[in-house]
Amino acid sequence: MFKKKLSVVMLASLGLFGCDWNDDDKKAVEEAVKDNVTEEVVKPEGLNVQVDFYNELPLPLNDQQKFKVGFAFDIDNSGKIEEENDLIVQAIFSNEEPRIVVGDSEHLSDINVPGTRYVVADVGSAELKIVDGKSVVAINILPEPKLIESVNSEPGILESTDPMFAKYTQLLKSVNNQTPVSAFVDYNTSSEPGVESFDSITESVDIMYQGDNSDIFDAKDDYEGIENYADIKRVSFSFN
């Protein structure tokens, strides 16, 4: 969604020109109005993450490629990520619809696959796209998951009375731009074992980034592996 902001006097757009204005004057003001209309992105509610890369991962992905973006917030500031107390999120891209997983061993997802402990209707969105020849990933995590409407209680279907629902919403409420965070990107292909690419915003995924996480910049060419697809340029977090 976009909203527009106008930062100049609106005489031209309202047609309120004086009688001494000639066509050149009108054109000049109209151009000034046009040039000063800017678009501001209105981000969706919840946790928003954008990852910018130095390079381009060719799209679309085939059925043997996977591109994973993961991040974890050290909410209790213990210096390490623990599923019980911290927020862990992964967005997985392949030749199918992007999949978002929240948690680790007892994770929550909007796709019922082996290992999914809790299934919901929607947990958020993830997009992998190319902008100006560079890969960009945009992720939104909803402030609370959209539940599956069900008449009867079913195993694996998350309900509002389940402790996991309260835990999920509380974890999201607990993170902000000062929460220590770890983030990584991993690319691999099953067709060519060993041809992969990995990068993180710190020296190791076990090391938390401390400070304002609104914009975290990472050095170029510090990725591991053969391909440069995972080379992170910037990771941005915002909370709405």
Image (cartoon, rainbow, N blue to C red):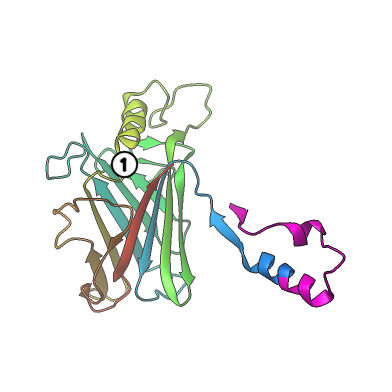
Q: Specify whether 51 is left or right of 59.
A: left
Amino acid residing under circle 1: Asn
Which residue is situated farthest in the left direction here?
79
Residue, disc 1: 176
- Using the rendered view, name the quadrant where residue 4 is placed: bottom right
Residue 170 at least partly seen: yes
Query: Is residue 218 one of those drawn in magenta?
Result: no
Q: Is residue 191 or residue 39 the one in the foreground? A: 39
Q: Position of residue 65 (x, y in %)?
A: 37, 68
Q: Please provide percent x and percent y for residue 189.
A: 31, 70
Secondary structure found at label 1:
loop
Residue, x 30% and y 34% (percent of image)?
174
How many residues crowd mark 1 within 10 Å: few (<14), some (14–19), many (20+)? some
Whether residue 189 is visible, yes or no, is no
Range of magenta residues:
1-28
Q: The C terminus lies in which quarter of the figure?
A: top left
Residues 130 and 196: in front is 130
Report the residue at 37% width, 57% height from top: 92
On screen, residue 110 versus residue 87, left or right, reads right
> In the image, residue 30 lies at what x, y percent?
73, 68
Count of numbered marks: 1
Q: Is residue 42 above or below residue 26?
A: above
Q: Quadrant of residue 217?
A: bottom left
Q: Is residue 92 left or right of residue 20?
A: left
Image location (x, y in percent) of residue 155: 39, 28
7 within the magenta span? yes
- When the figure is inspected, residue 127 is found, relative to residue 231, above or below; the finding is above
Residue at far right of view: 19
